[in-house]
Image (cartoon, coloured by chain):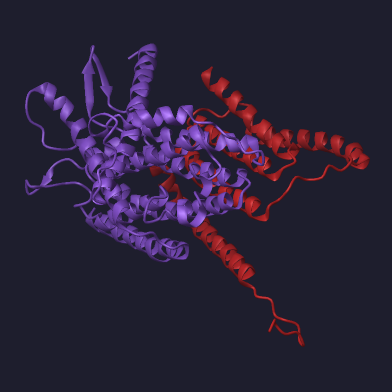
Chain colours: A red, B purple
Amino acid sequence: MLHLVLFSVFGAICVAGAVNLLVQRHPINSALSLIAVMASLAVEYLLLGAEFVAAVQVIIYAGAIMVLFVFVIMLLNAGEEERVGGSRVAIVFGIPGMLVGSVLTAWVLLRYSGTSGVELGAMPGPPKTIGWLLFHDFLLPFEVTSILILIAIMGAVVLASREEIPAPGERGEV
Amino acid sequence: MSVTTFVIVSVIKTVIALFVLLTAVAYSVWLERKVVGHMQNRWGPSYVGPFGLLQPLADGAKFLLKEDLTPPHVYKPLYIAAPMLSVIFALTSIAVIPIGNWVDIFGLHIPLQITDLNIGLLIILGVTSMGVYGVALAGWSSNSKYSLLGGLRASAQMVSYEISLGLSLIGVLITAGSFSLRTIVESQQGRFWGIIPRWNIFHGQEVAFFIYLTSAYAETNRIPFDLPEAETELVAGYHTEYSAMKFAMFFMAEYANMITVGCLATLLFLGGWNGPLFGPPLLQAILPVFWFVAKVFAFLFLYIWVRGTLPRFRYDQLMAFGWKFLFPLAIANLVITALVVALRS
């Protein structure tokens, strides 16, 4: 019972944060709503019994990645977005399309996994179990993911350090 | 014990812990002013009460009665929320910190910890990571160039040194085998050869303690890493535009972070509440708490001592030190510790 109540409350906070993310005009408010979404997701993980994943979600996602998002917004001095009028095409095709898509997705998922709920403790909880899985069953994906992240870092370094080559005939200031 | 008993005991523990922590924050300000004063060959607070002991009370009254000015150009929601966020995250980590063994009162067997999570250490790391938001949002919402620069510098510094902080703790985790703080302290019981205590600092984690110490100074924005709040550089950094109670909240958050970091160092490196026990059973129940407090006090004194002694790092020196020296050193410590533990078992 308490499980259901907590799930509903934090699920509602999560959805409200996500909707607020789209609705807010100033990007910093959107970033803060995303942090609220991350935090409520962490509580949902906790309700499933995956305490390590919940803690790591807060540390990495809400505590490091979102900080960098907030940095970028602060540095770029992003202002409020303009309000443009709604597009009628989007409403006519979008809303029915969204409804059909979500019904289809729900049908496929429920057919695959059944309509019974996920029980408490279904996920691997203790860090020991996760460590075991990560280094035994999922060793190859783990190592390949680290190389993926290395590629992303190298790309970021190259993009950030690219210097402008002056056009021929131009000189710098005397 | 039943649910109602558990809830009542937890509420009482929380109230006591918060009260003790807030008093400790107030008196660590007093301690700092006294110690730095004596280091600089002057008295420090000595008027208000004997030895200036009522100075924190006077400071509290001042902050409450001061004019709380909100500049017109700030972004109000975040301006008001940022100090609250700082204080909330600074005070939350006391929930998993154990200060002693057990207490048997009224037939109840109560651990001296608000909650013993089996991922206690990760919770503290998570709360520390979230604490960056108070600083970053304060700097941005103040809408002033000094605040923005100070806020950006402070948050970049905190994020960079969080990495070496976390990595230095993993060596302790590997030797202890658990994230639960109580288990880590219990693994440091006993002595080597009857004399040297089996604290982690003597048990192979000396380098890790050094890394932790330095990263902790940088995490809490203290000298020698306090460029984000240096008066000569940035007026007052991210809390330039704050006055009275909001400034006091940032102040409290900084000292509460110091105390949390000290408690963590005590638990992980200095053996927690382990210490010589003697005397009647009542004394034996209280002595562990006394040892814990003494060790945290020693750590805080070290903090204040360093503050009174060292000059501050320039910002590029600070970032280079964190990324190019501490981070590889922490990884090397991790690799060597893992190697030793794997070869031993």
Work out whether B303 lies above or below B47: below
Looking at the image, can residue A126 be seen?
A: no
| Residue A44 percent across, percent down from the top left | 55, 32
Along the viewing direction, whichever of A104 and B299 lies nearer the viewer: B299
Rendered-image quadrant of the N terminus of chain B: top left
Relative to B159, is B209 on the left or the right? left
Work out whether A151 lies above or below A94: below
Relative to A20, is B271 on the left or the right? left
The image quadrant of residue B292 is top left
Along the viewing direction, whichever of A18 and B63 lies nearer the viewer: B63
Seen at 50% across and 42% down, the residue is B130
Seen at 73% across and 48% down, the residue is A79
Relative to B156, is B273 on the left or the right? left
Looking at the image, can residue B312 be seen?
A: yes
Work out whether B133 lies above or below A120: below
Seen at 70% across and 81% down, the residue is A173
Q: Residue furthest front?
A: B47
| Residue B140 percent across, percent down from the top left | 60, 47
